[in-house]
Image (tube, rainbow, N blue to C red):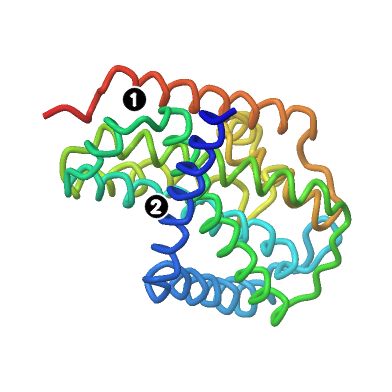
Amino acid sequence: MTRMRENWIGLKTLVAKEVTRIFRIWSQTLIPPMITMTLYFVIFGSVIGARVGKISGFNYMAYIAPGLIMMSVITNSYSNVVSSFFGAKFARHVEELMVSPLPLTCILLGYMAGGMVRGLLTGALVTLVALFFTHLDPAHPWIIITVALFTSAIFSLAGFTNAIFAKKFDDISIVPTFVLTPLTYLGGVFYSISLLPPFWRSLSRFNPIVYMVSAFRTGILGIYTMPLDTAYAIMSLFLLGLFATNLWLLRRGIGLRS
């Protein structure tokens, strides 16, 4: 019991450190996503959306809102962990954390929780921005909550993996630039994959972000573009796979030993 209490205290301390970091540099962690998404709403929603018309019975602004919210959750969950953990590696104070009595599971959960807080917080702020441009009437609140939690956790763990293998600051921008951004833009944020030609529609089904965006859009708008059970199965698979992989990497000390 004493050991569990000590682990809980350590986990809370690590999460508090990560959350404090988010709010300490709020001008870098919270404001830029709001500005970026506002520009997306103005350019794609107001300017282009007026010419696109309705998709699945909804005006274009309302249709892209869930996708833009998901985009902010994905990018901020990922970037928070990759920058924080790599910063700890670069400053070499991660070594003190690794030799502490805190279990590796708690270390991983602490960084994951920090990424989730930033991802969910920016998602909530972008939702407020969206309400200035369109009306959103959540159809399935529990789907919204669970998909947001799954997505933020998955990309927090993905950011942790990137941070483990990164050897210099340039390495933490390679994956977001060449992998994460293309997958996000091709994940149905700005369009319905049902509008794509058969080949590209089939290819899109290999993009996990498609399922996350689709499920989140179902939660907000109530439209079903992908089976929900498939979306939850894929998210569960990625969550468990990334958690197990990162835990194995930590135990082996990969990327942590110079």
When the figure is inspected, residue 211 is found, relative to residue 113, above or below; the finding is above
| Amino acid residing under circle 1 | Leu
In front here: 256 or 215?
Answer: 256
Decide which of 37, 258 is in the foreground and name it: 258
Q: Is residue 145 left or right of residue 11?
A: right
Horizontal and vertical percent position of residue 250: 34, 25
Q: Is residue 229 above or below residue 87?
A: above
Classify the position of the C terminus by image quarter.
Answer: top left
In this rendering, the answer to whether 66 lies above or below 2 is below
As helix, strand or loop, the secondary structure at mark 2 comes to helix
Q: In this view of the protein, which residue sits in the foreground, 91 or 97?
A: 97
Q: Which mark is residue 167?
A: none
Residue 250 numbered mark, or none: 1
Which quadrant of the figure contains the N terminus?
top right
Labels 2 and 1: the sequence-earlier one? 2
Q: Residues within 10 Å of mark 2 (few under 14, many from 20)?
A: many
Q: Residues within 10 Å of mark 1 (few under 14, many from 20)?
A: some
Residue 175 lies, in percent from the top left, at 33, 42
Q: In the visual, does 175 lie left or right of 94?
A: right
The residue closer to the viewer here, 233 or 187, is 233
- Residue 249: quadrant of the picture: top left
Quarter holding residue 252: top left
Q: How many numbered marks have been drawn onto this rendered protein structure?
A: 2
Measuring 47% from the left and 34% from the top, which residue is drawn there?
106
Residue 96: image x %, image y %? 24, 39
- Identify which amino acid the numbered label 2 is placed on: Ser
For label 2, the residue is 79
Who's the residue at 64% across and 73% down the image? 45
Q: Secondary structure at mark 1?
A: helix
Side (left or right) of 167 relative to 48: left
Q: Residue furthest front?
A: 2
